[in-house]
Image (cartoon, grey):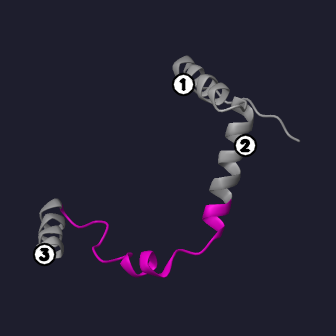
Amino acid sequence: MSTITIPMPEEDLAFLRAWSKEHGTSAEALLAQQARNLRDRLQKPLHPDVAAAIGIISPDADEETYHQYLEKKYL
């Protein structure tokens, strides 16, 4: 197993340690599990419904175009 050092604000580290303790794990185990979850999620293909929704509106569309799209979609 490898070891890394992750600089983070004391407030975040305190929260991470407290949350981990409340849930019966360690901060290190929690971070390792989150890394595994992220890797697993990124390796799985998108659900077909999500894949179909990608590209409905261009990511560089201006705000007005985006709001018009939302009005059309939800009204």
User: Is 74 drawn above or below residue 10 in the view shown?
Assistant: below
User: Is 59 drawn above or below residue 11 in the view shown?
Assistant: below
SS at mark 1? helix
Near-viewer residue (18 or 6)? 18
Q: Position of residue 72 (x, y in %)?
A: 13, 75
Q: Which mark is residue 12?
A: 1
Near-viewer residue (50 or 6)? 50
Magenta residues, as a range? 40-62
- Mark 3 is on which residue type? Lys
The disc, 2 or 3, on the residue closer to the chain's N-terminal end is 2
- Mark 1 is on which residue type? Asp
Q: Position of residue 25 (x, y in %)?
A: 72, 32
Indicate the quadrant where residue 66 lies.
bottom left
Q: Which residue is mark 2?
A: 32
At label 1, counting other C-alpha atoms closer than 10 Å, the crowd grade (few under 14, some 14-19, many 20 or more) is few
Q: Quadrant of the N terminus?
A: top right
- Mark 2 is on which residue type? Ala
Q: Which residue is mark 3?
A: 72
The disc, 2 or 1, on the residue closer to the chain's N-terminal end is 1
Q: Is residue 38 left or right of residue 53?
A: right
